[in-house]
Amino acid sequence: MVFLSLLSTTAMAKSIVVLGDSISAGYGINVDQGWVNLLQKKLQQENLPYTVYNESISGDTTAGGLARIDNILNKIKPDILLLELGANDGLRGLSPKAMENNLAEIIKRSQNHGAKVLLLGMRIPPNYGKRYIDMFYNIYPQLAEQLKIPLVPFLLEDVALHEHLMQSDGLHPDTLAQPVITAKVWRYLQPLLD
């Protein structure tokens, strides 16, 4: 009887993969206080049978995510993928077209594996020039529309312009920002949860 209940619980367990960069990897803060870990706690509080796997690497680009996605999909077989990449492409001035192609391929491969995808949009600082910034930022809503996936328009929208929520580098959110980010992701993630 106990074995059967354990078996059914295991069969019901679902997985969420976060594929991101330093924002999701918890750069500069205790990783336990990062938004990904807070999301796992929120799912537990709501009694939802999801395990969150943080496959984020500080400094990662969309090319890095694409190079790793097949292994992640085969190993974890996620029900949902939260895709938070692109900021480092922008900060390095890499080709927006290559970034778009990489993100599209990650999304398509994830969908082919049966995962629902939530795209987490990013922005880059204004010193990169309006043309590049617009090209960069427009990739996210265009991909969301083309591939029919939900989009968080700008993950750090309620954080980036508040100094007390950012680390001294002005690029990475601090510990106080993490619950704000979690709440934003949660709002868009909820409709994807079974």
Image: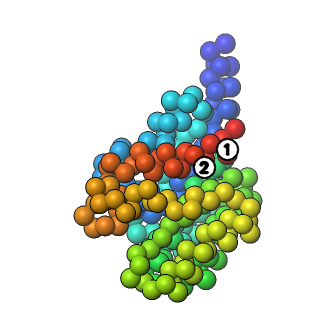
Q: Residue at x 61, y 83 (%)?
A: 97
SS type, badge 1: helix
Task: Specify whether 149 is left or right of 125.
Answer: right
Left or right of residue 25, residue 20 in this image: right
Q: Which residue is outermost to the top?
A: 1
Relative placement, left or right, of 150 versus 82 is right
Query: Callout 2: helix, strand or loop?
Result: helix
Percent coordinates x, y for residue 150 in the rendering: 66, 57
**At 31% from the left edge and 67% from the top edge, which residue is drawn?**
170
Q: In this view, does 46 lie above or below 165?
A: above
Q: Eyeballing the image, is 85 above or below 188?
A: below
Binning the other alpha carbons within 10 Å of mark 1 as few (below 14), some (14 to 19) or many (20 upward) gives few
Are the residues at dot 1 and dot 2 in contact (C-beta closer than 8 Å)? yes
Return the residue nearer the eye: 4 or 183: 183
Q: Measured from the top left, where is residue 166 in percent x and y?
A: 31, 59
Please name whichever residue, 37 or 181, is drawn nearer the observer in this view of the structure.
181
| Residue 72 appears anywhere in the view | no
Q: Position of residue 136 (x, y in %)?
A: 54, 78
Amino acid type at circle 1 is: Pro
Which image quarter is the N terminus in?
A: top right
**Residue sitting at x 40%, y 57%:** 159
Residue highlighted by disc 2: 188
Q: Is residue 120 visible?
A: yes
Q: Which amino acid does label 2 sit on?
A: Tyr
Quadrant in the picture for residue 143: bottom right
The image shows residue 53 at horizontal and vertical percentages of 51, 48
Estimate the spatial distance between the alpha carbons at disc 1 and disc 2, rounded to whole Å: 7 Å
**Residue farthest along the left direction in this orientation:** 168
The residue that disc 1 covers is 191
Q: In which quarter of the image is the C terminus?
A: top right
